[in-house]
Amino acid sequence: MIKKEMIAMLLAGGQGSRLGVLTSKVAKPAVAFGGKYKIIDFPLSNCINSSVDTVGVLTQYQPLRLNAHIGIGIPWDLDRNIGGVTVLPPYEKSENTDWYTGTANAIFQNLDYMDSYNPDYVLILSGDHIYKMDYEIMLDYHKANNADVTLAVMPVPIEEASRFGVVVADEENRIKEFQEKPEKPKSNLASMGIYIFSWPVLKEALIKLKDQPSCDFGKHVIPYCHEKGDRIFAYEFNGYWKDVGTLHSYWEANMELIDIVPEFNLYEEYWKIYTKSDVLPPQYISDKARVDRSIVGEGCEIFGTVCNSVVSANVVVEEGAEVYDSIIMQGAVIKKGTKLHKAIVAEGVVIGEDCRVGVGEYADSKLSTKIYNCDLAVIGENSVIPDGVTIGKNTAIVGKTDESDYTDGKLESGDYIIKAGEI
Amino acid sequence: MRAIGIILAGGNNSKMKQLSNKRAVGAMPIAGSYRAIDFALSNMSNSHIQKVAVLTQYNALSLNEHLSSSKWWDFGRKQGGLFVFTPSITADNGFWYRGTADAIAQNIAFLKKSHEPYVVIASGDGIYKLDYNKVLEEHVNKQADITIVCKRVPSDSDKSEYGVIKTDDRGFVTDFVEKPTKSDATLISTGVYVIRRRLLISLIEKAAEEERYDFVNDILQRQKTEKKIVAYVMDSYWKHISTVENYFEANMDFLNPEVRNYFFKEYPDVYSKVDDLPPAKYNPGSNVKNSLVSSGCIINGSIENSILFKQAYVGNNTVIKNSIILNDVYIGDNVYIENCIIESHDTIKANTRYVGGEKPEIIVERNFRYGI
């Protein structure tokens, strides 16, 4: 009989709506990160590096790119005879067919998948955090405490704690109280959305709560387990962990990679991050180029200036173009004489000649102040920007734009262009 | 499929000097991210040849490691696949490969068990793109026994490294001279041949009986009047790695946008083993001009007209000009390097200076990396 001690369930179905136009066509876990990777590469690599070789990836929102990226799991060595990676989209059933309505509901709908591996423990992960973590150590901790549930937590500044699920633990780290996004946090230990459940405990809770609308781990499952007196422990993690859920935190996490010795180091031999990568030639830096304080991916051709930026594979920066403090994703083209400041340019974007992007004074967004509230000019995938236009700060553009979309060749700060119903 | 492939990658070449100490020529690193044999393998794959044998003998470790998985060239198939044959002692044979023909003879079962009518034989040291199907087509149209892929060269060029070919106006080979001291011919052999499988088996078996072991000297040369040999002329880029100088030159060719675009941007692609390396990182003080930089490099110094292979670390105030830095090299601070080839896994101590002459110098420095 098949037996896996611990299997992982990776939640990758969310849109990540606060990444704005970056997630208009892809789920957040499939968003590019660090010049080469996708966000989901981090939890997937953590799994294989922690000897967790059975991973169910739950997808729902715009799964095409994610499916293509994961494939049968070859880049992560997750192509296994038994186990390996399995993509789990919602499916039709003879009764109660439903989309995944919440994190725990998604897991509930895949009880059969988990049962088929006869696990002792189930690791619940989310596909939108940047970190390196050894889940095996967390499992040892879970076992040593004879725990039913173990939550990974990390200390955060108390003023930020209200953005997270907060736990209050005793001296033995057993959790006494659990607050979901509290106004007045009683502790600074924030839940990282990483859980180890003993399988019978999880199964019982999911079945018990199956009629709970939008059943969620933080809001329903953990409080349920807590009320019934399960042994819930907090596993404190002190390494680098970044939630890249907002445009600003996403930009910042990318920029942190550029530091001389970054806190989150991709260059260590130990604990490699794996990703699906094509065979690409080396990058070419021309005699007119200047590249400084940047990360540049394979196959790029740099003829202009790249400074303080993260540039993914196959990007072309033409002569005289200048890129500062920006993130440029795979295959984008920045034409002659164009200057970018604090821009996020998604895959396949073509920016015409002599444009100015990210200039002027900050202004509140006319599109959504919840999503767009920093200096960044964000250009969604495969957009086209015509020659000679000026684009302000805190702007969003999606689609093939031409001169007629810009008044006097200008897009003011805070403004947006969303073409052809794409949002 | 109409053809199977054989890649001869067994040879050593003393003209590669120290670079061949630890690798066969087929494993020589090329253009930042590739190995010489990737070009022949990719050509096979892109020509839809699904069954390929690589014959290797000299210092095969590096090559075997590179070929450890066939998936990179899309040979990981149930039908066919990639076979690596190194010499082995069997009941009827206890020899190393005594030559290219002997290498094939010792693996004659591979040819006999196949059912494809033709064999494409290539060498593992050519840098080129070629659709072997076109060669095969001409081979069939001209009803040739053997087709040799040739490259046109100026009549006054130095051909002492090559097999030189003369043809009549229909493209049939009239003369074939191996490594002549002087020749006014305009065609050289690229070491790529197309031949019917059954004919190859009989030629190889006959040579083995006569204890002749070299494909070019003992088979091609002796058959040049007996068999109908056709020259297929390719006009595109072709270079062959046989000396330190032409190795250096072939790498530097990739700084030329025409060569780079031909290999990297034009379909079909060249494939290689993928390493899980992060993108290259440019720290403050880095200054890179007209150079190729590969994954995993960390650059603090100045680099000009050079090629950095994977995972090079370049220290502060270090200057590198006109050089090739092979894989996983650590270069300390305040180093000056010009006209050199830095061997892979080298550690170059801080405050040192390496300057090659007109010919590039090969630097092998086995220093202890950590704690310098």
Image: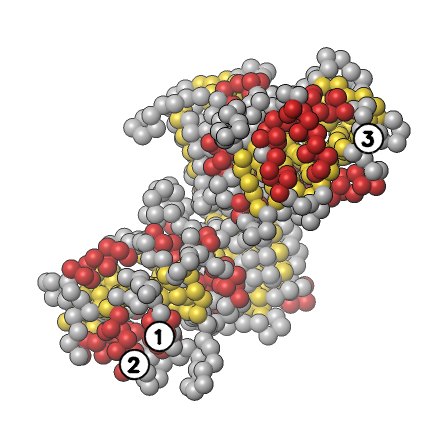
On whether disc 2 and disc 3 are found on a single subunit, the reply is: no
Mark 2–mark 1 Cα distance, whole angstroms, equals 9 Å
Disc 1 packing (10 Å; few <14; some 14–19; many ≥20): some
On whether disc 1 and disc 3 are found on a single subunit, the reply is: no
Circle on res. A207: 2
Screen quadrant of the C terminus of chain B: top left
Q: Callout 2: helix, strand or loop?
A: helix
Front in this rendered view, residue A392 or B75: B75
The outermost residue toward the right is B169
Residue drawn at the location 50% of the way across and 20% of the way down:
B18
Q: Earlier in the sequence, mark 2 or mark 1?
A: 1
**CB contact under 8 Å: marks 2 and 1:** yes
Q: Can you identify the residue that label 1 sits on?
A: A111
Residue drawn at the location 69% of the way across and 26% of the way down:
B206
Choose top left, top right, bottom left or bottom right for residue B261. top right
The outermost residue toward the top is B181
Compared to residue A268, the image places residue B79 above or below, namely below
Disc 2 packing (10 Å; few <14; some 14–19; many ≥20): some
Residue A227 at what x, y percent from top left? 18, 79
Front in this rendered view, residue A209 or B208: B208
Mark 2–mark 3 Cα distance, whole angstroms, equals 78 Å
Circle on res. A214: none
**What colouring style does the render use?**
secondary structure
Residue A43 at what x, y percent from top left? 37, 58
Q: Can you identify the residue that label 3 sits on?
A: B228
